Amino acid sequence: MKNPTRLASGILGVNAGQLIRVAKEGAGAVTMKSIGPREREGHKNPTVIEWEHGLINAVGLPTPGYKNCDDEFEELKELKKIKVPLIASIYGTKWEEFIEVAQYVASKKPNAIELDISCPNTEWEGTQFACDPKLSGKIVSEVKNACGKIPLIAKLTPAANSPVEVGVACEEAGADAICAGNTMPGMIINADAMRPVLAFKKGGISGPALKPINLKITYELYEKIKIPIIGEGGIGSGNDALEYIMAGATLCGIGSAVWQSGTGVFKKTCNEMDAWMKKNGFSNLEKLRGIAHEK
């Protein structure tokens, strides 16, 4: 990677053209919108609302289904020319569906596959897979066998009783990296309308409000696992990214800030990181990684 930022899944990842544009404008890697087993429309509007401290969304995992993604993967071959890695995000409503989708996606040879085990699990009455260490480990193990040598990222949820315990289980099952993490479940009600602002009523909170939560998870994971961590949640500046690096992250995912600041946020974040490092006498990020644990 040219720099330690990546476009998080779910933002500007719905088609190849958007991903290529983001790559050309400074992202170190790009992540596709999650691909599912069957065609799915998602929830009715409104699905994304901006509030005082970020975004809340209930898009509902819309997907054309993996069988209809051939053309998109063909277009995304352009990313190899500009040397920006492609991460394919996948989900399933049953653990077996993760294997089904992973086998297809692996045949397209992305640079990595991210498991969105934070999506609702219909087998367990709405419980997220990533709330259960054993189930998360089972999915990671099965998908790892299906995708061969392609690196596998397990995406955690801050809603778990112990995201760190889930992360440890995923590492033991063969995950190559951990993403910490997804949005935090929440709700906003419009007092004048006397109803929730989202059509689905509840959704996932992202942006600045999420940063202290996922930063803590990153910090705690760093002390328990050896594989790389992708810190994600509320990163919109070089300072935000550096906080995650100091907590132990290897990479920094940017999502909501693209909505708020545009695709230039990747270069802006990297430039601000560079300026801070020069000012404070650090020549590379490796010297900063996990430094908050030493203080």
Image (cartoon, helix red, strand yellow):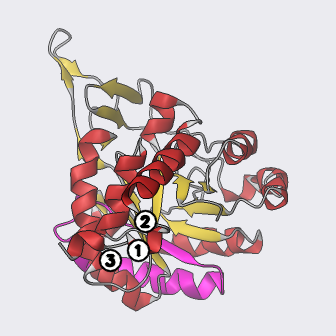
User: Is 146 part of what is drawn in magenta?
Assistant: yes
Question: Where residue 131 appears, x then y in whole percent?
Answer: 26, 68
Label 1 belongs to which residue?
287
Q: Residues within 10 Å of mark 1 (few under 14, many from 20)?
A: few
Give, as a single range, the part of the protein colored magenta. Answer: 136-165
* Depth order, front residue of 39/273: 273
Write the residue at 69% across / 48% down: 23
Residue density around tag 2, few if under 14, some if 14–19, many if 20 or more, within 10 Å? few
Residue 152 position by quadrant: bottom right
Residue identified by numbered label 3? 167
Q: Quadrant of the C terminus?
A: bottom left
Q: Earlier in the sequence, mark 2 or mark 1?
A: 2
Mark 2 highlights which residue?
A: 282
Q: In the picture shown, does residue 15 fall above or below 102?
A: above
Callout 2 touching callout 1 (CB < 8 Å): yes
Answer with left or right where residue 113 lies relative to residue 165.
right
